[in-house]
Image (tube, rainbow, N blue to C red):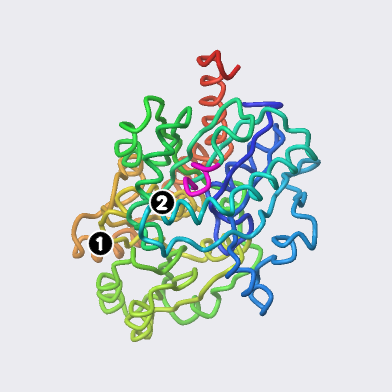
Amino acid sequence: MLKNKSIICIALPTWEGSYLKSTVQLMTELAKDNKVLYVEYAFTYKDVLKGIFGKDIPYKRILGLKSRIRQIPIAKGKFIHVLNLPPVLPVNWIKDPDTYHRISEWSMPKVRKAIHKAMSELGMEDPIIINAFNPFLGNHLIGHLNEKLHLYYCYDEIGASEWTKNHGARLEALFAAKVDAIITSSNTLFANRKHLNKNCFVVKNGVNFDLFSQKADHYPLKKYKEKYQKIIGYIGTVDHRIDFKLMEACARSYPNLAFVFVGRVTHREGEARLRKHPNIFLLGTQPPSELNNFIQAFDLGLIPFLKNEITEAIYPLKINEYLAAGKPVISTEFGDLDDFRAIALITKKPSEFIDTISVELESDSIDKQDHRIYTASQNSWEARAAQFGSIIKTLLHKHPKIV
């Protein structure tokens, strides 16, 4: 394990949220043996106004009316520091690259100042920087933080998202060429990024094994258990990745089964289609600490993704979460899922996906459940953080300029 280092994570995700995030999980593990400062999502002035008028945004910390740094316990006697940056101008809507750069640069002096102040308070003189999917800040910060190592952690296809389509791929390519190494979360992302930097690695997503392998302490799906023979579940955002036509076909094929979706809903047309079916239930966002109670109530977990530019780069978090609970898993073949072909059902056709549901429910066994749990235990976030740390140690050893 990497130990006794100062690490600053320039993160795109916020620390808190309604779903588990790979960046948060990795930094939590690294913070057990290192001093870690998590610089979370840079809120805009527009976000601040939303916070003032009632939305759950920490506008007082963003504006400096409260301390921007907070200390969050992560384990017995261990903690991580989280920093809120000053507000920045909203610029993603600007299409012209030169205009985008000039306006975004306007916010950077105070951003750099806030990070330097936090570094001084925490005694972080020559940190390792891990930029988590945030080349928007990365291009402005690299070389300005007295860093001994600067890494880019890429966990998604940046050019495929609606909000990043104007500048994401361009800024990522610029940033990736400057950093000491890229670490991706899937083989597909690795294949698509390795030409950008000679040092490119893969650390796949993991699972909070201790959480998802424990038995439920209560039963939030009890009423569905009483009405339907089995519960077929999905954990995650209900968005453009979902094959809604496939899920409608599943609901029609199995009127005696309850199909439960646990997660925020962002695709309104898809939501309307699903709600037409009496045995499909959209339960909305649930606290991350509660997700295991839902999965433990599932009889089978689904990953019903379409195959497209976004999904083909995904190494899905939820597959290990289902497996840690011992649940059978059925997935569409949306990307590189070779790691799971021996333990989950990866289907190529809609008809195969539908038919396999009944087969898996009927053939499940204690031995199969134990094998799934064991497989997930090998993919813990602790193991992934050890991989991450090993890469950092190798880079520090190989680069005299950063030792």
| Relative side of 373 to 346, left or right | right
Circle 1: is it few (<14), some (14-19), or many (20+) Cα within 10 Å? many
Give the image location of residue 35, x and y in percent: 72, 35
Give the image location of residue 222, x and y in percent: 55, 76
| Relative side of 365 to 106, left or right | left
| Residue type, label 2 | Pro
Look at mark 2 in the image and give the residue it sits on. Answer: 316
- The image shows residue 99, relative to residue 262, as above or below, that is above
Give the image location of residue 87, x and y in percent: 63, 60
Identified at 24% across, 55% down, the residue is 347
Magenta residue check for 294 = no
The C terminus, quarter of image: top right
Q: In the figure, residue 77 lies in which quadrant?
A: top right
- The image shows residue 270, relative to residue 170, as above or below, that is below
Q: What stretch is highlighted in magenta?
A: 134-140
Identified at 73% across, 33% down, the residue is 124
* Badge number at residue 353: 1
| Foreground of the two, 76 or 27 | 27
| Relative side of 12 to 55, left or right | left
